[in-house]
Image (cartoon, rainbow, N blue to C red):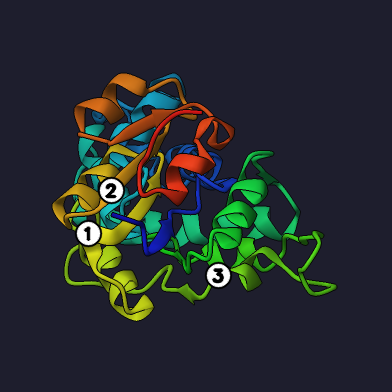
Amino acid sequence: MSFAAVIFDVDGVLVDSPHERAWRDTLDELMRGPWADIRSSTTYTPDRFDSALYQSLVSGKPRDAGALAILEHFGVPLAAERALVYAREKQNKVVALIDAGKFRVFPDAIPFVLDAKKLGLPLAAASSSKNAGQLLSSIPVQAPDIAPNSKLLDLFDVDISGRDFPQGKPHPDIFLCAAQELHVRPDDCIVVEDAVAGITAAKSGGMHALGVARHNDDAALQAANADLVVHSLDEVSRNAMARGYLKAA
């Protein structure tokens, strides 16, 4: 057995993006401004919208679904209608944060991508976020055998981030599309994810799932049946990958 491709989520795997901050800040601004009149009828307080809640309700899901999940969680009246406003305002916020450079690349991300390419594996970016391409195209990459002035996005053979699918994660549509565009079988693919919804999507699509526990959520990723869970991509054995196995170094 050997792997034929690697499919990457972006936010939380390759890039520490401003999405979580944008979701929190946008809701707080709405609750202090246009929605101030309904705030007392909800369970929302800023401290209740923490990273754990973001991971469980939003991470890895399409924007509109995430917005609705948050508003329903806090008991916001007319949640479906207000979710459209929330999603739109959050998008404006995250674009502004990205333009201002309010993100960072995880130090283990580019080395892992480069090593996967050295193994001859085609790569796909498959994030639910419509901003993933903007992030990847703003990150410079300098390495031997990489063309000068290359960006991280240039290392990927396929980028389907932000496309609309009939069903978002935890359904496997986005990953199955990535495999199809890479011309490989789903069961020969590694999917690299940091969210339970993404791991569930990968396994539902018959793929190998590599969970990156950026938030010390090992147990949740393991419970979603990830084939390997690590805290850093540096922990993944490249030799094992070359032989078709996911193992810690």
* Residue 231 placement (x, y as % from top left): 50, 26
Q: Earlier in the sequence, mark 1 or mark 2?
A: 1
* Residue 173 placement (x, y as % from top left): 21, 66
At x 27%, y 36%, the residue is: 226
Q: Secondary structure at mark 2?
A: strand
Determine whether 191 is above or below 197 in the image. Answer: below
Q: Secondary structure at mark 3?
A: loop
Q: Which mark is residue 245?
A: none
Q: Which residue is mark 2?
A: 208
Would residue 113 be visible to someone looking at this image? yes
Q: CA distance from mark 2 to mark 3?
A: 19 Å
Q: CA distance from mark 1 to mark 2?
A: 7 Å
At x 64%, y 73%, the residue is: 154
Front residue of 161 and 51? 161
Q: Earlier in the sequence, mark 3 or mark 1?
A: 3
Q: Earlier in the sequence, mark 2 or mark 3?
A: 3
- The reply to whether dot 2 and dot 3 touch (C-beta < 8 Å) is no
At x 28%, y 60%, the residue is: 188
Callout 1 amino acid: Asp
Q: CA distance from mark 3 to mark 1?
A: 20 Å
Callout 2 amino acid: His
Question: Crowding at label 1, few (<14), some or many (≥20) Cα neighbours within 10 Å?
Answer: some
Question: Crowding at label 3, few (<14), some or many (≥20) Cα neighbours within 10 Å?
Answer: some
- The reply to whether dot 1 and dot 2 touch (C-beta < 8 Å) is yes
- The reply to whether dot 3 and dot 1 touch (C-beta < 8 Å) is no
* Residue 132 placement (x, y as % from top left): 53, 62
Callout 3 amino acid: Phe
Would residue 198 be visible to someone looking at this image? no
Q: Which residue is mark 1?
A: 187
